[in-house]
Amino acid sequence: MDICTTDSEDEYDGGTISEFEGSDDSMEGDTLFDLEAISDVESGASIGDKSIETLSASSGLSCSPPASPPTAAGRQTDFTLLSDPFSDTRPNPLPTCNTDFPDVHPSIILHHEASAMSALDCFQLFMGKDVIAALCLWTNTRAAYFLRDNPHISPKKFMGKKWSNVSEEEMYVYISLQLLMGLTHLPKISDYWSTSTLCQGPPVFRAVMSRNRFSQIIRFLRFSHPDDAVPRMPMTRIRTYFELLRAKCMEYFSAGENLAVDESLILFKGRLHFRQFIKTKCKHFGMKLFALCPSASNARGYTWNFCLYTPAMYEEMRQDPQLAILSKSERVPVHLMHSLLNQGRHVVLDNWYSSLHLAEYLLTKKTLTSGTIRTNRGVPDIISRQNLQKKQSVFGQKEDVLIVKFCDRRLVHIIPTKYTAGYKEQSYHVKGGGREMLQKPLPIHHYNDQMGAVDNVDQLLEPYDPTRKSYAWFKKIGVHMMSRMVLNARVIYQNLHKCSTGCSEFIKLVVHEMLQEYSLGYASLCVVQKEQRPKKKPRRTGVPMLAAGAQPPPPTARAQPSTSGAAATPVVHGLMTIPSTANTQRPRRRCRIYTTEGKNKWTRKYCPACKDFPGLCLPEHHQMYHSQQ
């Protein structure tokens, strides 16, 4: 979002007052917020100025949270105003960025040059065999534990039906159907298998997996081993899954020189002790995910690193000696960039993370920063007390740190260590249809260009969000990360093929290739739909006009197509409906699998490619029957 077009002066980029404190846990002599006194704030409540005064009056706390270290007051006096912004010079040379490769990893480029990588190949870079095998193991283990602990569960429930371990092929089919749900939104999951003419899903759902099997998988789906789960330690539910995906995201694409750190909110309204409330987000309630995304134009939509907010997150970061000297909000960008420090990178932040202390700390790590900053986080009085009219600005400098104050619709402070002072002329519309020229400070112009990387990911995910309502928060965030991996695969696909592919089109391409690879029923469905597709009418040609008095030529006999030597239509193994006959409109056959188990089950499905046309009622029975042949 452009920082010069925000109307409200009291709106900040999310978070709670307990997180806004920006205080150093290791500082001595400064007043900190009593977390027990404002426990309701830590749950996500947004508090205005009146609430802060009420809290401080009732609990004796200081109203202004100490956002900078104890020595910040001494550092603020070293700033001097620049009378001529174009005379800004830095005493020390800026660190240069050192990257191992420009964008896509060289090994992927070599593989693409040898054999063109498809959309599914790009997706399997992130959701490869190792991740799928782990998901199958965790899901099957959880199902085994459940059936062991509930031996008398009613067989009428889908959980009580016969359970077979999830294979890797089934897991890929499940993921493809989960992604398809983001393209076709229906009120309930069961509606995707409904045959109602009013509300039904695409026929691919009924062709590749039964509803009960899908419900079984989603019921026992886990993103870590069940033995690793520890009560009141939420990250044990997803830590292994996050580590697998994080390593792949960092390996296959370069972070680039410019990056952005921001938070995303994953909607969740269930009971959760680390659920957050951010009033500036459209969803308001949910789980907060910190993300580090490249700001380059060819990397928009890529998530390079991420971490989930939990109550123990800041304490885990504090165990690192390098992060112990930073405040809670300052630890987040340093933690996400731990492998990129001392490489000359440039990170863009909003005012929830930025401070004078953080900017100077990152300079010692040869890392540059740009970000909006609050006045209580290190802005010197010589700048904060300047009374500016609209469209005016002022610059203050201390060695390699620059602070800019600009008045547009509201006062904005920005602290860049990469860019020098200066202006960029920009035109904008005014009321009445006219246009005016604005001298915008150069650091603000660069900030607006590079800060929207994380927001761009949210904009691409929102229309095709595949997550559903769930009591289990880890299932929702696990499926959300699958959709993020689709966006990462899309970025690599576009860089390899030098093309621009829409998000919805890429999802369809991935699902199509995945089902073709791992589902027999999908291939059969494609053949049936191709045969049922109406044939194109022959193109009409002009008829020559007859001369006056001339008779039209006699009609010629229409040539009949010869059946001798004609190539037969290939028949594919798959489940199809038994065609009706002259005597029976809805013929049925006994299911071969149930018959071998001693059960009498009639079905309307059969395999037309097998020799004896066996009746098979479920896609699982179809795969089981052909594996036995």
Image (tube, grey):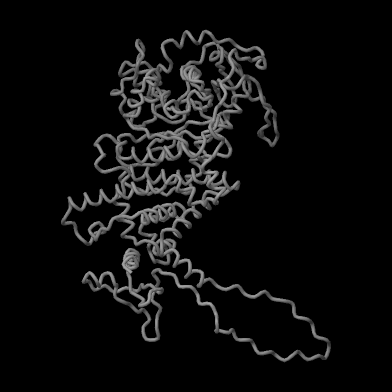
Relative to 311, is 400 above or below?
Answer: above
Q: Can residue 472 be seen in this view?
A: yes
300 or 473: nearer the viewer: 300
The image shows residue 514 at horizontal and vertical percentages of 45, 56
Residue at x-position 22% and y-position 58%: 160
Relative to 68, is 171 above or below?
Answer: below
The image shows residue 315 at horizontal and vertical percentages of 32, 25
The image shows residue 7 at horizontal and vertical percentages of 54, 30
Instruction: Name the image quarter holding the N terminus.
Output: top right
The image shows residue 598 at horizontal and vertical percentages of 21, 71
259 or 459: nearer the viewer: 259
Relative to 264, is 542 above or below?
Answer: below
Direction left: furthest residue: 152
423 or 520: nearer the viewer: 520
Looking at the rendering, which quadrant does residue 595 occupy?
bottom left
Along the horizontal axis of the image, is 187 left or right of 111? Answer: left
